[in-house]
Image (tube, rainbow, N blue to C red):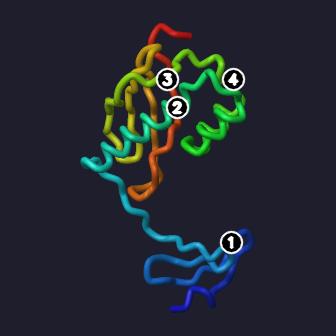
């Protein structure tokens, strides 16, 4: 059956089957099943590395906004990009990462909770990924307990 010969409804685009999914004829993108993430050593290592990297980019109160944002924004998911877009980095209490992150919750293969020690206490980071092949991106920075 040729899917492309069927009707195209308003607000949709025509699709053609492909060996690994469906190709959107308007965008050329292939849509298909995405690999489901699981917790294994590689996932744990990549989550910790991502948390350390994003915390090092975040904990830079010495930078002006433009430089800070240019380094941080690519490491954030869409919601965090909107949430932190107007933050003043000079208000961040941490200025350095003092150790490696530790995963505190791995109940979902799509979300990682990682505690990262800093010179201002331990920040809890929430990271997420779209699928097993996607990078971990920061969703939220939770300041150390007792800090406003």
Asked where in the image residue 105 lies, by quadrant, the reply is: top left
> In the picture shown, does residue 141 fall above or below 41?
above
Front residue (pair 83, 45) = 45
Separation (CA) of disc 1 from disc 4: 41 Å
Instruction: Give the mark nearest the N terminus, 2 or 1.
Output: 1
Residue drawn at 63 percent across, 87 percent down = 6
- SS assignment at label 4: loop
Could you say whether the residue bearing mark 3 is in a helix, strand or loop?
strand
Locate residue 148: give its quadrant: top right
Circles 4 and 3: CB atoms closer than 8 Å: no
Q: Are marks 2 and 3 in contact (CB under 8 Å)?
A: yes
Foreground pick, 95 / 13: 95
Which residue is the extreme one toward the right?
A: 10
| First reached walking from the N terminus: tag 1 or tag 4 | 1
Identify the residue position indicated by label 1 in the image. 12
Instruction: Provide residue 118's location: percent of width, then percent of height.
Output: 43, 20
Residue where numbered disc 2 is placed: 140
Where in the figure is residue 147, as x and y percent of width and height? 51, 10
């Amino acid at each position: 059956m040729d899917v492309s010969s069927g009707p195209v409804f308003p607000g949709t685009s025509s699709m053609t089957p492909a060996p690994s999914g469906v190709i959107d004829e308007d965008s050329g993108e292939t849509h298909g099943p995405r690999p489901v993430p699981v917790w294994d050593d590689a996932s744990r290592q990549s989550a910790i590395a991502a948390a350390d990297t994003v915390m090092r980019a975040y904990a830079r109160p010495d930078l002006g906004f433009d430089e800070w944002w240019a380094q941080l924004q690519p490491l954030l998911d869409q919601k965090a990009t909107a949430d932190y877009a107007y933050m003043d980095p000079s208000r961040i209490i941490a200025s350095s990462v003092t150790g490696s992150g530790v995963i505190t919750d791995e109940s979902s293969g799509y979300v990682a909770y990682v505690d990262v020690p800093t010179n201002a206490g331990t920040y809890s980071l929430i990271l997420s990924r779209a699928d097993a092949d996607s990078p971990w991106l920061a969703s939220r920075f939770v300041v150390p307990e007792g800090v406003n």
